[in-house]
Amino acid sequence: EAAVTQSPRNKVTVTGGNVTLSCRQTNSHNYMYWYRQDTGHGLRLIHYSYGAGNLQIGDVPDGYKATRTTQEDFFLLLELASPSQTSLYFCASSQDIQDTQYFGPGTRLLVL
Amino acid sequence: GDQVEQSPSALSLHEGTGSALRCNFTTTMRAVQWFRKNSRGSLINLFYLASGTKENGRLKSAFDSKERYSTLHIRDAQLEDSGTYFCAAEAGGNYKPTFGKGTSLVVHP
């Protein structure tokens, strides 16, 4: 199974804070995704990428930036965190757009 | 084994007809979400259910946590409905969502 790791696993910040969530996948998948999971809303796509240097906008991109620095690494950036961004964040990767997505363990973010 | 079994894996419909997709779960799930992945790779959120049924246009979904299944019904299928449909189930807590393997739907004129 593809290995997708995320760091940190838990993060607490204050309103207006600067947060970077990291994701690394070691199976050379082309596609990487960032989701947030909230009770009542389920899984929602923030940003995704099909390769190093590429970025595609997802369904809920406002307040988030992302950068795919290498084939393996995809970062989610919250430059001015707000309480509405308190959530459980998942990273995922897949070889191609129609392939199974492999998820990381998640990062729980609390914005006070 | 897989926690989420999605069927069928492929489906071909003529315009105007309908069918149902199903996801069976091997364990109790807290909620289920249905997506359609279009040709650009975007995941389109169709439904999120913690129980009961929801309807939106020609789509209707049901989720029964106790019986461990969810369905997605498509009626009066249109060409633009073509794509791959996924269910994703939440077990709760910090568990990552578990996706079904997808149903590839092709709608023919």
Image (cartoon, coloured by chain):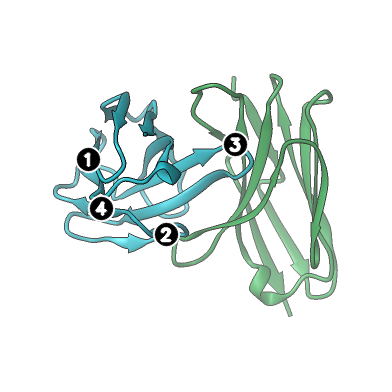
Mark in front: 3 vs 4 = 3
Mark in front: 1 vs 2 = 1
Any idea which chain is the green one in this picture?
B
Image location (x, y in percent) of residue A50:
29, 56
Residue pointed to by mark 3: A39
Q: Image height check: is B47 above or below B87?
A: below
Q: CA distance from mark 1 to mark 4?
A: 9 Å
Q: CA distance from mark 1 to mark 2?
A: 18 Å
Please tell me the colour of chain A: cyan
**First-in-chain label (3 vs 4):** 3
Q: Is residue B37 left or right of residue A32?
A: right
Which residue occupies the foreground of this view, B41 or B94?
B94
Residue neighbourhood size for the residue with mark 4, other residues' Cα within 10 Å, grouped as few (<14), some (14–19), many (≥20):
many
Residue pointed to by mark 4: A66
Contact between labelled residues 4 and 3, with CB atoms less than 8 Å apart: no
Image location (x, y in percent) of residue A73:
19, 42
Mark 2 belongs to chain: A
Residue pointed to by mark 1: A20
Residue at mark 2 shares a chain with residue at mark 3: yes
Q: CA distance from mark 3 to mark 1?
A: 23 Å
Residue neighbourhood size for the residue with mark 2, other residues' Cα within 10 Å, grouped as few (<14), some (14–19), many (≥20):
some
- In the image, which disc is placed on residue A58? 2
The tally of labels here is: 4
Q: Residue at x 18, y 54 (%)?
A: A52
Residue neighbourhood size for the residue with mark 1, other residues' Cα within 10 Å, grouped as few (<14), some (14–19), many (≥20):
some
Q: Amino acid at mark 1?
A: Thr
Q: Amino acid at mark 4?
A: Ala
Picture quadrant of residue B12? bottom right
Q: Residue at x 19, y 46 (%)?
A: A71
Q: Amino acid at mark 3?
A: Thr
